Amino acid sequence: MTQRIYIYSPSSAVRNTAAVRRGIARLKALGHEVQLDPDVFATHMRFAGDDATRLAGIERAAASGADIAIITRGGYGLTRLLPALPYKKIAKAIDRGMKFVGLSDFTAFQNAVLAQTGRVSWSGPAVGEDFGVESEPDEIMQACFEDLASGQGEGTGWQLPTSERVERPLQAKGVLWGGNLAVLSALAGTPWMPQVKGGILFLEDVHEHPYRIERMLTQLLYTGVLQKQKAILLGHFTNWVPVPHDKGFKLKTVIDWLRQQVKAPVLTGLPFGHVPTKVCLPVGANVTLAAEGRDAFLLWGHTH
């Protein structure tokens, strides 16, 4: 199903232009009509243009009439734009059917939009990182994106580790929200942090040692965020290096600690993060989480 896709750069500057161009070519090969923002390759220090340039790009994306607006890459840059985002225009675009898609630094945009407008956006691939890889793009990632594009995606499933086998069937309903842990924890205490109670929070990160992950989780714990959720889903936490000083402190240590702090179930293995195999997740949508044995499912039906 042909979709109009608008590609823009709201965060860090594109350094690997070849990867983004490969991603553009692959989206076109899938039959989509692709439009590039005029400043998609802009550069200002580490950013994809200065603040005004990137804000203008976001506004053009919202006004484009495209079916999907997808970022070239994450990095850093959206947090400093949050007070000035055109929230009303973004909300109108979403109401007309536009799906804003991204991950990593895009977590700031997604949660601010949820907090300010209540609208749904999508955690999913980026053009360079996912569609622009030198090898073939991950089949599951691409299939999930195509389901999103066609409006057919109604949920996702994954297998829990053997150690997390659910003996009694688990079911929880609530608003799905979250994203990159570092970005989300930086929003705590601000107007751009969604006030979700009884939600299903999902988290992932990259290049963060487990002690840093724990420190960011304590921020969400001490501000009362974690205690209000019905479930916490952990995606992938990748590209960190253990050091001798750890003396056995590892990611499992942090997960075990987290389970002692909250009553809600903490499930791992969600196929999302800075990894090739990632699903598309509706941030701000009402979902149903179900788990039995090693099978876990997130279901959302048709989401707008």
Image (cartoon, rainbow, N blue to C red):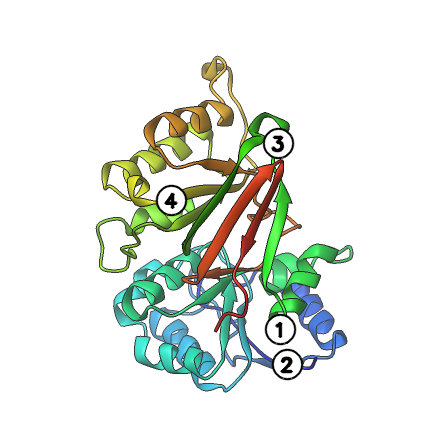
Task: Check if mark 4's residue and mark 3's residue have beta carbons within 8 Å.
Answer: no
Task: Check if mark 1's residue and mark 2's residue have beta carbons within 8 Å.
Answer: yes
Mark toward the start of the polypeptide (4 vs 2): 2
- The amino acid type found where label 2 is placed reads Gln
From the viewer's side, name the closer residue of 49 and 21. Answer: 21
- Callout 1: SS: helix
Residue at image mark 3 = 161
* Residue found at x 33% / y 59%: 79
Residue at image mark 1 = 149
Disc 2 and disc 3: Cα gap in Å? 37 Å
Task: Using a 10 Å C-alpha cutoff, classify the residue at mark 4 as few (fewer than 14 neighbours), some (14 to 19) or many (20 or more).
Answer: many
Task: Check if mark 1's residue and mark 4's residue have beta carbons within 8 Å.
Answer: no
Mark toward the start of the polypeptide (1 vs 3): 1
Mark toward the start of the polypeptide (4 vs 3): 3
Q: Position of residue 138 (x, y in %)?
A: 72, 55
Residue at image mark 4 = 230
Task: Check if mark 2's residue and mark 3's residue have beta carbons within 8 Å.
Answer: no
Q: Vertically, is 101 above or below 134?
A: below
Residue 3 numbered tag: 2
The quadrant of the picture occupied by the N terminus is bottom right
Task: Check if mark 1's residue and mark 3's residue have beta carbons within 8 Å.
Answer: no
* Residue found at x 50% / y 49%: 289
Disc 4 and disc 3: Cα gap in Å? 20 Å
Disc 4 and disc 2: Cα gap in Å? 35 Å
- Callout 4: SS: loop
